Image (cartoon, rainbow, N blue to C red):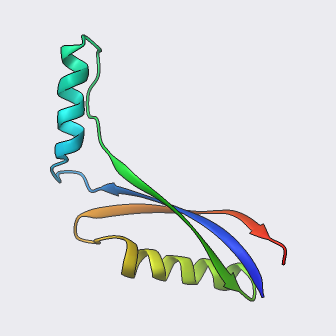
Amino acid sequence: MRKFVFEALITLKNGILDPQGLATQKVLKRLKYPIENVKFGKLITFEIEAENEKNAEELAEEITYKSLINPVLENYELKLLKEIEA
């Protein structure tokens, strides 16, 4: 088995209220920064053991979609960072 390291960047879909982003934007505007559309997200990294890269990617997609995000509210970008030789 080989190990693969993935990164999932999870963000709210357009139109979903982001209270943390709004609060941060208000503070930054009060400090006179010319800033708009502040949004917060989550970055999750994880390792998967699999026979090959294709199987690892399929499993990472399944894990991310079924367990790490709320597909009604969130989008995600999944990236293979590296393979770890055992």
Q: Is residue 63 left or right of residue 16?
A: right
Q: Is residue 75 left or right of residue 47?
A: left
Q: Is residue 31 above or below residue 52?
A: above
Residue that protrudes farthest toward the right in the picture: 85
Q: Is residue 27 left or right of residue 65?
A: left
Residue that protrudes farthest toward the top in the picture: 32
The residue shown at (38%, 82%) is 66
Quadrant of the image occupied by residue 52: bottom right
The residue shown at (26%, 21%) is 28
In the rendered image, residue 50, in percent from the top left (x then y), is placed at 70, 86
Between 77 and 67, the one lying in front of the other is: 67
Quadrant of the image occupied by residue 51: bottom right
Q: Is residue 13 left or right of residue 3?
A: left
Q: How many marks?
A: 0
Quarter in which the C terminus is drawn: bottom right
In the rendered image, residue 26, in percent from the top left (x then y), is placed at 17, 26
Q: Is residue 34 above or below residue 86?
A: above
In the rendered image, residue 74, in percent from the top left (x then y), is placed at 30, 63
The residue shown at (17%, 51%) is 15
Q: Is residue 18 above or below residue 74?
A: above
The residue shown at (78%, 88%) is 1
In the rendered image, residue 35, in percent from the top left (x then y), is placed at 29, 22
